[in-house]
Amino acid sequence: MRPETKSLALHLGLLALLVIAQFVISPFHHGNLSRIMVLAVFAMGYNVLFGYVGLLSLGHALFFSAGMYGMGLAMQHLGVSALAAIAVGILSAFVLSAVVGAVALRTTGVAFMIVTLMLAQAGYLAILYFGTYTRGDEGFVIQPEFRTIAGLDLTDPTVRYFAAFLVLAVCLLLTLRLVHSSFGRVLVAIRENEERARMLGYDVFRHKLIAVVISGTLSGTAGAVYGLLFGYVGATFATVQYSILPLLWVLLGGAGTVIGPFIGTLFMFYLIDFSSGLTSAYMVVAGVVLVLLTLFAPQGLAGEVKRRLLPWLP
Amino acid sequence: MLAVQRMRQNPLDKLFVRIQTHFTAKATGWQIRRGTEMAKKLIKPILDTRRGVLQKMAVGAGALAGASAMPGLMRYAQAQSSEPIKIGFQCHKTGIGAAYGRWYERTSDAAVARINDMGGINGRPVELVIEDDGTDPKRGAEVLEKFAKQSNCDVAFGTLFSHVVIGSAPTAGELKLPYFVVSEGHHVASGMLNRYTLQPGITDVRSQVIAMAPFVADNLGKKVTMIFPDFAFGHDHRDYFSAAIKEQGGEVIEMIAIPPTETSFTKYFPKIPRETEVIYHVMVGPAVLTFVKEMGEFFGSNKPEIFGFIDSLEAVDINSPGLEFLEGTYFWEGNPRYAQADQTSFDKNYREAVGVNDQGSSVTDSSDISTYAHMFGCWETLNVIKKGMESCDYKGPDDRPALIEAVEAMTDMPASDDHPQGTKEFNGKTHQAFGHQYISQVKDKKLNVVHTTPIEAGYYPDEVDYTKQPF
């Protein structure tokens, strides 16, 4: 079997498992999985840039919140439908990531991290500054009666689960397609040796910029969908914490693997949830586990599987 | 009945029933609960399965059949009535609200201990299920799901920070989980949230601010400069106070919004107009000590009247170095931190139960200053939950709508051991409590109450009628 076929089968298998999970898991885990699937899309967006291009951004909360606020403000102040609001959210993230990419990609390494961090902080402060419209740090609620698409009530747990699943499935398969494409291979080439890629005639800046836009748009999609499915838009999602989280999810799951971000998000979610039931110092538990994973599985969970068992894992 | 008849006919069953009766009589409530929990754990994985309706029916039918034949399971059925009422406490144990969360937890523990000492609720013990929300709205919503779907809590309660409340309330509405917040935010009464979210134990910021305006205008001055953090809580003060002082014949002559990331404030003080008679400040966050110190350096001894909200200095010792400048200034307090000369027996009992001394700090560590102006809300809210459950004869999650209606029907909440902060009026339509506010002056490094506002001073027109929303 060709590696591409194997990887497609694996990822379709994951999606099939998630469909089956809808029918067999408890309501608590069902709700959790809805959240995890949307957050995994955020991580997958981050992974496109970090895992495949090797650019470490500390500002992805900006794209996530751009999607969330693009969606939320359109519904709150323009009265557009949920589906149109999602489109506005995705478009906001698309435009913003193009602008941020054009600015930040003039830097490399640590400077890139600092510039993305500062731009994200500027975005956070802008949300607070325009508090008249955004309700600042408190945020605002998307009322249940507006959270419907084509007559489907997104506050219903089953509908919400499948909405989250649909977004995850589309983004997962798109990312898989991207990784297998010649464009994706050029991104990996840039990650491995930027100068060599340039010497071979590839327009490195253009490729990186497109990667930033894809990464930011996927993150923004997650933000828009998260806000709509769970009914809240708030500035907390624009704080630096939400730039660090996707980095952790990707590192844990396995940077540079398509399936890794989902695994990392799932693992981290339950690590926090489980350890908080053991002790109030649950972040210490989470920290120790993270250190252990970094020491013994530095390529993340899926990265280790790739290294030891499935070298064809994309 | 059939089962009993069958047991009467069977000598072996007779013996089994006698053994069973003997041990059941000796079993403590704890043992029964423990047995119930174990039985629940054993069948939970099956019962929890989604779309497992047929399985549930089969299990249910089997359980019923088994119960009729097995006395052991009958005991489980009997023990249902003594199962604890579970109250999910969404606690800010970590994050920016941790100082509040620590004292909210102590107060809630004390209130639950008192309720259990008095016989619990409807004869059932109360159990507090505590989860840390990290003062984060995303985690807050997740915690509510955990309460409703995993811990099987009857209600959720205890949230302070507004963004966590607003981020969690949609989830509470979807789960149909009564969510009693102790936030003082205006979000509940503004109509932004839903019928399942209530704030019966503490007044909201709009009510607090408009109740302050007459005192400020009559006693301190009519030309006010406001200094507030440039986020939603500060904007509420800006909007409500500027309107309220105007009604009193005064005016806000300058509004100075401070970005939340600011660490030094010297550049803002020259913006204060010379004709300012009163500075109204509501600085929340760790930079408050720097703010006060730098304001003292700016004004020296020639300062205008200064009025602030104690939110800035909750859990902070008023005797801290750098706060000397506050001597003679005024503060709003939700509940007076220092025991006053006219202290009520209710406040005395409440302090003793929570473990707070007359100076407002922990009885075991005088450097551990309480969040006294707010934490009474947890105590009072838990008593409201008790009263609501008792008046609707609450038995389980099916009675959640009845509980909401019972609380909505409440009006007078007289000062008592249940309401040690003072008398309150509850507005069932807006789900918001109204009460007295206290204005204290810093004198000899203590906060002394100089004025108590009437409840009516905090009234404003209803902005929502939650009772019209369906469950």
Image: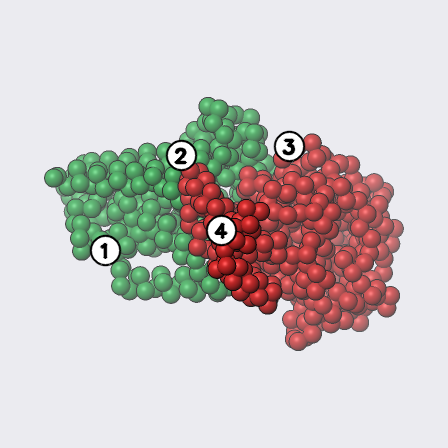
Measure the C-alpha gap from mark 3 to mark 2. 26 Å
User: Foreground mark, 1 or 2?
Assistant: 2
Alpha carbon separation for disc pair 4 and 2:
43 Å
| Residue receiving disc 2 | A162
User: CA gap, disc 3 to disc 4?
Assistant: 43 Å
Question: What amino acid is labelled 4 in the image?
Answer: Ala
How far from the left and from the top, in percent, is residue A307? 19, 54
State yes or no: discs 1 and 3 in contact (Cβ < 8 Å): no
Q: Which mark is residue A66?
A: none
Which residue is more in the foreground, A129 or B310?
Answer: B310
Q: What is the letter of the green chain?
A: A
Q: A73 above or below B262? A: above
Amino acid type, residue under disc 2 in the picture: Phe
For label 3, the crowd category at 10 Å Cα-Cα, with few meaning under 14, some 14 to 19 and many 20 or more, is few
Q: Does A98 appear above or below B383? A: above
Q: Secondary structure at mark 2?
A: helix
Label 1 – label 4 distance at C-alpha: 54 Å
Chain containing mark 2: A
Tag 3 subunit: B
Front residue of this view, candidates A9 and A261:
A9
Question: How far is mark 1 from mark 2, CA to CA?
Answer: 30 Å
Residue at horizontal 20 percent and vertical 41 percent from the top: A7
Q: Which mark is residue B470?
A: 3
Residue holding disc 1: A304
Q: From the image, state whether disc 4 or disc 2 is nearer to you.
A: 4
Q: Crowdedness of circle 1 by 10 Å Cα count: few (<14), some, many (20+)?
A: some
* Disc 1 versus disc 4: nearer the observer: 4
